[in-house]
Image (spheres, rainbow, N blue to C red):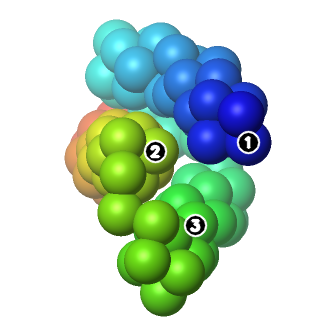
Amino acid sequence: MPQILETVMLVCFGFSWPMSLIKNIKAKTAKSMSLKFIILIILGYIAGIAAKIISGQINYVLAVYVINLIIVSMNLAVYFINRKYDKISCE
């Protein structure tokens, strides 16, 4: 049961990341994005993945952590792309 509840939590968080990614791609600006927040979330997912590996709980929950980490990392990439757009628009 704990794994199911953890998965539900991760899926709930996970649905917000693709929506954020799409919004940020369309916005073409980093003004509404927080680099510190994105990095903090990435570190949290890395810690969750490490905890699963260290405890030997290699299961479907780990896959959800990895999927969320990938999507949040894509948001990080978009942040830097959008910063370039911001610099170009200021010139």
Callout 3 secondary element: helix
Q: Which residue type carries mark 2? A: Val
Q: Position of residue 17 (x, y in %)?
A: 49, 28
Q: Nearer the viewer, mark 1 or mark 3?
A: 1
Callout 2 secondary element: helix
CA gap, disc 1 and disc 3: 14 Å
The residue identified by callout 2 is: 61
Residue 3 in view here = yes
Q: Which residue type carries mark 1? A: Pro
> Are the residues tagged 3 and 2 within 8 Å (C-beta)?
no
* Residue positioned 40% across, 20% down in the render: 18
Q: Nearer the viewer, mark 2 or mark 1?
A: 1
Front residue of this view, candidates 5 and 14: 5
* Residue positioned 48% across, 87% down in the render: 54
The residue identified by callout 1 is: 2
Front residue of this view, candidates 31 and 60: 60
Q: Position of residue 21 (x, y in %)?
A: 40, 25
Label ID, residue 16: none
Binning the other alpha carbons within 10 Å of mark 3 as few (below 14), some (14 to 19) or many (20 upward) gives: some
The residue identified by callout 3 is: 48
Callout 1 secondary element: helix
First-in-chain label (1 vs 3): 1
Q: Is residue 14 above or below residue 15?
A: below
